[in-house]
Amino acid sequence: MPDPLTLPIAGERMMVPTRDGEVRCILYRAQRKPAPVYFDMHGGGFVGGNCEDVDVWCDMARKELDINVISINYRKAPDHPWPAGANDAFDVVSWFYAHAEEFDIDKDRMAIGGHSAGGNLTAVTCLRSVLENAPFRFRLQILDYPPLDLKTCAFDKFQHPMAIPPQIAIMFDACYIAPGQGGDPLCSPAVAD
């Protein structure tokens, strides 16, 4: 695999401060100012992938909708298990919200979405914004095939022929969470009341 930092991208790479250090993001700027913002998180089973993987998708959303797009490269397990990636996502959104004027972001028109593991982090970030009484709320969340229930064993879930095999899902979960953590709504948003 090539070093993601060597890949050509349409946006601007930048480092964003979080509670645990800096997180790499890619910013795609809208033409209009201020503009709504869409935060995007790549997939990879919580263990792989990079923000560069969704460059084409993020740039297309920016061009087609004339919005700001921010792709978040959250930290990965097993080196950084839950809640590291969830904290990164929440902290990056919080930082951009606090610096909205600097980036011509319309704070009242924020959306967030993610693919696979990024979909989980999307739902968790939305839930946390309410539970932690954050100053921001989202107008929209896009969940692209998200694993929202990490409490239930993958073998006990509905098996779709196009889905990740349960053996792989169990491996991803074992890298991401410790036994018993799957019941936490900030890990498995589907169990929230």
Image: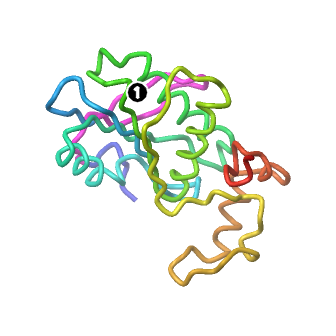
Quadrant containing the N terminus is: bottom left
Residue located at (58% from left, 53% from top): 46
What stretch of residues is rendered in magenta?
Answer: 8-27
Name the quadrant containing residue 186.
top right
Name the quadrant containing residue 32.
top left
**Residue 49 appears in the picture as rendered:** no
- What secondary structure is found at the residue carrying circle 1? strand
Q: Which residue extends farthest left?
A: 31
Name the quadrant containing residue 133.
top right
Closer-to-camera residue (158/44):
158
Residue labelled with disc 1: 15
Residue located at (56% from left, 38% from top): 126
Q: In this rendering, would 14 be left or right of 126? A: left
Q: In this rendering, would 178 be left or right of 165? A: right
Mark 1 crowd level (few <14, some 14–19, many ≥20, 10 Å Cα): some
- What kind of residue is marked 1? Met
Closer-to-camera residue (136/124):
136
Closer-to-camera residue (7/138):
138
Q: Position of residue 56 (x, y in %)?
A: 26, 54
Name above or below for residue 71 compared with residue 96.
below
Closer-to-camera residue (164/35):
35
Residue located at (61% from left, 33% from top): 87
Q: Which residue extends farthest right?
A: 180
Name above or below for residue 108 compared with residue 119.
above
